Amino acid sequence: IGAFLSGLALNRLIPHSSPLMNRVEFIGNAIFIPFFLIGVGMLIDYRVFFAGWNTILVALSMTVVATVAKYLAAWAASRTFKYNKGELLVMFGLSNAQAAATLAAVMVGYNVILGHTPEGEPIRLLNDSVLNGTIVMIFITCTIASLCAQRGAHVLSMQEQDCVDEQTAGVENSFMISVHNPKHVDELINLAGAMRSKQDTGEMVAVNVIDNRGNDEVQQKRSKRMLDHAVQVASAADVVLNTCLRYDVNFVNGIVGAMREYRTTDLILGVDKSLFLSKSTLGNVLKGVINESTGNVYVYRAEQPLATLKRFVVIVPPEAEKENGFPFWVNRLWNMARSTGSQLAVYGSEATLGILTALNENNPIDMTTHLLATYDDMLIVSKDLHSNDGLVFVMSRKHNPSYNAAMEKIPSYIDTYFPNSNFILLFPMQERNMLYLSV
């Protein structure tokens, strides 16, 4: 019971795509579950099944009663809350499996000895027939539960893909992570992993750009070490990460060239308080990358680990839904919310919030909406910000429908209102049908 409660407490602190979750699942699947099954198998006395029909009747009765009761409960809940068939099957599958708790209860009764027979055999509260029948019930209900949950999950997955991913079809999502500061590597990898969908088959690439006009061996070794470290972080989360050490005349040309070469849809850049950002505007390097690229660009500052964030406050400009990249960045934020178990608190115009609310009804996450009168009304947002909140500013490139002159002042607002908060500056994708015509 203590281990179960510990798991509940840690559940929201460990992202599903993190290295720690991968290790926990490996230890559970490779060590604890096999030992549990070995222990259960050693409890069975197979000779009891051939001694008479009593054990078989007990097993069938327990299995039928447990399965029918759990299905009726799931059916009643689905009718009450208007769940669809996929949700009904998942709910039934996840609740029908009888395992550790059932076995523990039966073992308690099995070990209670009420007396002894004249031959000296113990008279147990629950005899061998009940114990063996319970083992059979566990086997049958776990099999039924696995099949039903798998079928329901497939139905839900297809529905979710139709809802959010239908507008992103035909584009193979590929993430590129710029690693130039050892302090940023872990968090950038974690962010990319959180934003990726399990269905994404595109590459994840870590890139480091070196000035080709020099021959600094120290810089080359340092860059290779960072890329190797990025591979280790990604592999710990069971993610395949490719690396690219690129030589170019400057950072902007190197990054944009690598994006074209790998046909990247999403670029993640790491910044801190002193790098790239000034008091009034974005740095020239960031501006160059943003203006020259057409994919989603995320400028990320991590003041605390991603796994410790409880909520992301998303500030969306008016008419953001009119841009080609709208369904793409919505898909990424939905994935991030699910992966980290965080809530999305979205501030925006009435029209934009209406569309996001409709999407959330078909593809639900933990989301709240708040009407924002003007995009630069940061005082309202700052009053609602808590210590474990992250910020997402949905930006836009000039001459696009949702561009607002106030976006130029966002770095200044961050320095003034959110100096110690995690934030993402999100520049949506501009070309939907073909990201890069040529290299």
Image: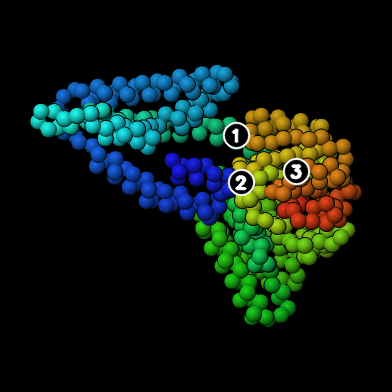
Q: Position of 69 compared to 57: left or right? A: right
| Mark 1 crowdedness (10 Å alpha carbons): few <14, some 14-19, many ≥20 | some
Task: Please state the horizontal and vertical placement of residue 5, each as a whole percent of the image.
Answer: 49, 42
Q: Nearer the viewer, mark 1 or mark 3?
A: 3
| Mark 2 crowdedness (10 Å alpha carbons): few <14, some 14-19, many ≥20 | many
Quarter of the rendering containing residue 124: top left
Residue position marked by numbered label 1 in the rendering: 160
Which residue is pictured at 81% across the width and 61% down the height?
277
The amino acid on which the numbered mark 2 sits, given as a three-letter code, is Thr
Specify which label sits upstream in the sequence, 1 or 3. Answer: 1
**Disc 2 vs disc 1: Cβ atoms closer than 8 Å?**
no
**Which of 208 and 14 lies nearest the eye of the viewer?**
14
- State the quadrant of the N terminus: top left
Q: What whole-number distance in Å separates the C-alpha atoms at marks 2 and 1? A: 18 Å
Q: Position of 139 compared to 310: left or right? A: left
Specify which label sits upstream in the sequence, 2 or 1. Answer: 1
- State the quadrant of the C terminus: bottom right
Quarter of the rendering containing residue 283: bottom right
Q: Nearer the viewer, mark 2 or mark 1?
A: 2
